[in-house]
Amino acid sequence: MEPTTIDAIDELVARSNNHPELLKFHAYHRANPQVLDFLVSEIHLLAERNSFSFASLWHYCRWKLSLVTGPTTTYSMNDHLTPLYGRAILILHPEFNGRAEIRQAAGGLCIADEIFGTRPAVAKLPGDYSRRLEWADGTSLENGWRPSQPHVVTRPMNRKADIHPR
C-alpha cells in the first residue's frame, strides 16, 4: 500500500470548519487531484488577462478532462464544488486574489466562506478586477495562514488544441 501524503488541501481542510460540503470537497480532491492542478494551470495561463471566472474554468475543466477519459466515461464534477475550489485556490495562491469575482450569498456568507473562515472584502482595491477574498477577521490572504506544503502543480495536462482538425 502506498503511503498517504499530506498536501496543501489536506492542511486547509484540517484548519477549516467541519461541514458536510467540506467532506465532499476533500474526498473529491483526494480522488481527483488533477482537477486542482488543471484549474491552477489554466489560471496561470490566463494571468495576463487579469481576470477569470471560476465557474467558466470549472466547466472547461470538466470538458477537457472528459476528453482524456474518452467518450464512454462521464467525468463527474459537481457544480456545488466550484465555490469551494475557488476559495481554496485563492487561499493557496493569493497571487490570483482580486482577479475573479467573489460573490456573497444573499443572506450573508456563502457556505465556502463559512467553511474556510473567509469573506469578500468590503471594497475592491484600485487595479483589481473585483473585491479580494480575505480572512474573516479582515486579514489579507497574503498575510494570514499559509500551508506548510505549498500547492505545486504536479499533474500537468496535455495541452492539445481545443479544436481538433478533421
Image (spheres, grey):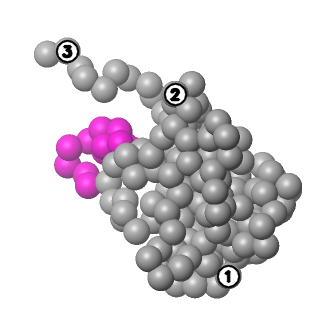
Q: Nearer the viewer, residue 16 or 108?
A: 108
Seen in the picture, residue 95 relative to 160 is either above or below; the reply is below
Check the image and name the residue furthest to the top.
165
* Highlighted magenta segment, given as a residue range: 60-74
- Neighbour tally class for label 2: few under 14, some 14-19, many 20 plus, Cα within 10 Å: few
Q: Mark 1 = which residue?
A: 17
Amino acid type at mark 2 = Arg
Q: Mark 3 = which residue?
A: 165
How many marks do you count on the picture? 3
Residue depicted at 55% across the width and 41% down the height: 129
Q: Quadrant of the C terminus?
A: top left
**How far apart are the two marked residues, 1 and 3, measured between alpha carbons?**
48 Å
- Foreground label between 1 and 3: 1
- Foreground label between 1 and 2: 2
- Where residue 10 sits, quadrant-wise, is bottom right
- Secondary structure of residue under mark 3: loop
In the image, is residue 63 part of the stretch drawn in magenta?
yes
Principal secondary structure, stretch drawn in magenta: helix
Taking the image as shown, residue 82 lies to the left or right of residue 69, namely: right
Residue depicted at 44% across the width and 25% down the height: 159
- Secondary structure of residue under mark 2: helix
Q: Mark 2 = which residue?
A: 49
Check the image and name the residue furthest to the left.
166
Measured as percent of width and height from the top left, residue 13 is found at: 68, 71
Taking the image as shown, residue 79 lies to the left or right of residue 118, namely: left
Amino acid type at mark 1 = Asn
Residues under numbered marks 1 and 2 in contact, where contact means CB atoms less than 8 Å apart: no
**How far apart are the two marked residues, 1 and 2, measured between alpha carbons?**
34 Å
Nearest to N terminus: mark 2 or mark 3: 2
- Foreground label between 2 and 3: 2
Nearest to N terminus: mark 1 or mark 2: 1
